[in-house]
Image (cartoon, grey):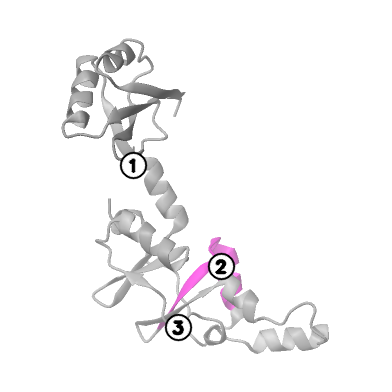
Amino acid sequence: MFVRDHMSPNPITVTRETSVLDALELMKKHKIRRLPVVQDGRLVGLVTERDILRVSPSPASTLSAFEVNYLVAKMTVKDAMIKRPITVPPDMTIEEAALLMREHKIDNLLVMEKEKLVGIITQTDLFEALIKLFGLRRPGVRVTLEVEDRIGVLANIARRVADAGINIINVANRHKDDVHTYVVLRLATGDVSALLPALEAEGYRVIHVSSYNG
C-alpha cells in the first residue's frame, strides 16, 4: 500500500499573501486543518490552524479587542507558515510515511512528484489505510496465537486454515521474546470451532478469539 493510494489529491492551496483570516475561512469551509502554501507553482510552505492560532495575539493580551482584530486582519500566511514542510513521493509505502510522521512528531506529509505538489496525506488517512489493510470493516473472526518463532510456522498455520475451508483476510505478527511470537489472524468466517483444536494440536497456543460484524 502506497501513499498515492490514500492521499488526498490536488489539495487546496494558498499563497504567502493570503490573509490568515481567509486561510481560516478556507479551512472551515472545507473542513480541513492545514493548507499547503504555493507561490508561482512552487511549494514554499505549509500553514495549519494551530500555526495561525500560535502567532495570533493571546486573549490575555493587554491589547484592546479593536487592536487585536486590526493586527490579525493584517497578518498573512507568510507570518504563520512552516517554511520547509516535510515532503514525500507518492510511491512511498504507508508504513514509511507513518514512521516519518512519528519520528518528526507531525500529523501530515505533503506529496511531491517531479517538484509538483500532487497531494497531502494525514494521520487520519493512515488510520483509514490500516483499517482497510486489516479488513476491520469485514465480518469475520480474529484469532491470536502464541507460536514458536521458527521458519515455516506461518506456512503451516495457513495450511491448517485452508484445510478448515477458511479464507485468511489478514495476518500480522509481533515478537514476544527470543523464542516466541504472536500471530494474529483475521479470518473470513463466523465459526472457528473446528479450526482451533487443529491449531492447538500443532502446538500453537490460542491466546484470544473475537468476532467482528464489519
Q: CA distance from mark 3 to mark 2?
A: 19 Å
Type of amino acid under label 1: Leu
Kind of residue indicated by mark 3: Lys
Q: CA distance from mark 1 to mark 2?
A: 29 Å
Within 10 Å of disc 3 (Cα), the crowding (few <14, some 14-19, many 20+) is: few
**Residue 133 in the image, given as x and y percentages of width and height:** 33, 42
The residues colored magenta run: 22-38
Across and down, in percent, residue 164 comes to 24, 14
**Residue at point 18%, 22% (across, down):** 159
Residue underneath mark 1: 133
Residue on which the image places disc 2: 27
Query: Could you tell me if residue 8 is visible in this image?
Result: no
Judge whether 136 appears above or below 27 on screen.
above
Q: Amino acid at mark 2?
A: Met
Let me know if residue 77 is in the magenta part: no
Q: Residues within 10 Å of mark 2 (few under 14, many from 20)?
A: some
Q: Mark 3 = which residue?
A: 83
